[in-house]
Amino acid sequence: MDVHEVEMTGAAYGGSFVGRIEGKVVFVPFTATGEVVRVEVTEEKKSFSTGAVVEVVSESSARVAPKCSVFGTCGGCSYQHIEYSEQVRIKESIFLDSLRRIGGIVPECVEPSVEAAEPYGYRSRARIHVDGNRWGFYKVNSNTVVAIESCPLLDPLLNTLFKSIKKSIAEEPMPGLYEFEIGCSRDDGSTVARFYLDGKSPFDFEELLSSIEGLKGIEVWLKSGAELASAPARPIAAYGDTLSSYTVLGVSHLAPLGVFTQANTVENERLVDTVRRYATEGCEGQGPLVIDLHCGSGNLTLALASGFERSVGVEASSTAVVAANNNAEENGITSVEFIRSDSSQWLLSAAVKAKGLTDAVAVLDPPRGGDRASARALAELGPKRILYVSCSPPTLARDLQAIAAKGYSCTKAVLIDMFPQTYHMESVVVMERQD
């Protein structure tokens, strides 16, 4: 066994900490900056190594006992062993370092990072994997299911639902079940579930729905035969009401389980408030136009509508656009338009080019992989202000570099910790056009 004593000198995006063995960088998870640890090298690359902790020789003062018995095996959490305020400091350091090192971006103003009000029990949705008697999440860097009885990150409503479903299926097996999603609505205490099967099942879903208190809706999705490897599952049945609800800044939302929504509804409100504040800053009265790219079911678009004469949300998912339009109608918001389109294609369309966006504020809120094509197209159109909302500092920095190249400067940035105990983070960056 190749074991070395290593001092951990910093943190890297992805949950690992950084040290050196004979000058070569080694990435080691479940350690902390300042610790001296004995490390077994598990993989050698040309420019770096990865390793696993064998023994902590000298502990960080920020080290704490994790709350979860499978922490370190389950791949969901990276930082449960670190005191919460230090987690946020680590994330802010990674965030700002990524902007500078990858994108050459140095914000003029960095607002204090927003710590989560609830470091545990905050997740309002989850996907549970099933492998025989093992129900839980995937092991670190694998597709092996780690069995859990509950998860400290989940809203208590979801932990209760998880246990109830498991108990019911133990009494009446559900053939073909390989995965299920669960979600909850804190507003009314209700829950919903979606089951994924690899073959048709005689299971009585209506009985399950009626037997679990608070469960208001069930969807059943199917894969079969050759579909398992390539094609997505398809819906085959629904029972009850399968929409999850939440409220943000006075706007009520309903969203299907499959449509992206922020898992942390408490911190989502703080995120939306920050975006609205940045978008309307310096405006006298209402601004003329705000555009929200990758708008989902209208989480940001609808909250922004009050500050602008016209709000446009662009989203590729037809299901999300339907939900967004329904949410606008339910809240009586008439100054908003939702368009089903790929964001970059919409920005490059002749109609958008003809109208111009020079007086507009634009919000770009892509998935984890970023959206460099939209970032470039947006910067070419020249809105006065671009807000980039991101959960991935490396792709954020890459895309901001493309925006900066078109004459924008970074005036403001803030980290919002929506995902305590994990390495994931949310951030908002403001890029202003320099006339």
Image (tube, rainbow, N blue to C red):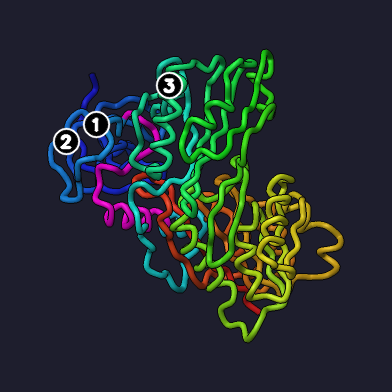
- Asked which secondary structure carries label 3, the reply is loop
Quadrant location of the N terminus? top left
Query: How many tags in the picture?
Result: 3
Residue hosting label 2: 56
Left or right: residue 157 versus residue 80 is right
- Tell me what residue is drawn at x 33 percent, y 48 percent: 120
Tell me if residue 36 can be seen: yes
Foreground of the two, 406 or 261: 261
Q: In the rendered structure, find residue 53 and report the number of the disc placed on it.
A: 1
Residue hosting label 3: 144
Q: CA distance from mark 3 to mark 2?
A: 27 Å
Instruction: Give percent across and percent down for residue 316.
Output: 72, 47
* Extent of the magenta region: 73-95
Q: Are marks 2 and 1 in contact (CB under 8 Å)?
A: yes
Looking at numbered disc 1 in the image, what kind of residue is underneath it? Val
Q: Is residue 86 magenta?
A: yes
Q: CA distance from mark 3 to mark 1?
A: 21 Å
Looking at numbered disc 2 in the image, what kind of residue is underneath it? Val
Q: Residue furthest left?
A: 58
- Tell me what residue is drawn at x 66 percent, y 66 percent: 362
Closer to the N terminus: mark 3 or mark 1?
1
Instruction: Give percent across and percent down for residue 257.
Output: 59, 41
- Asked which secondary structure carries label 2, the reply is strand
Please identify the quarter of the rendering in which residue 162 is found: top left
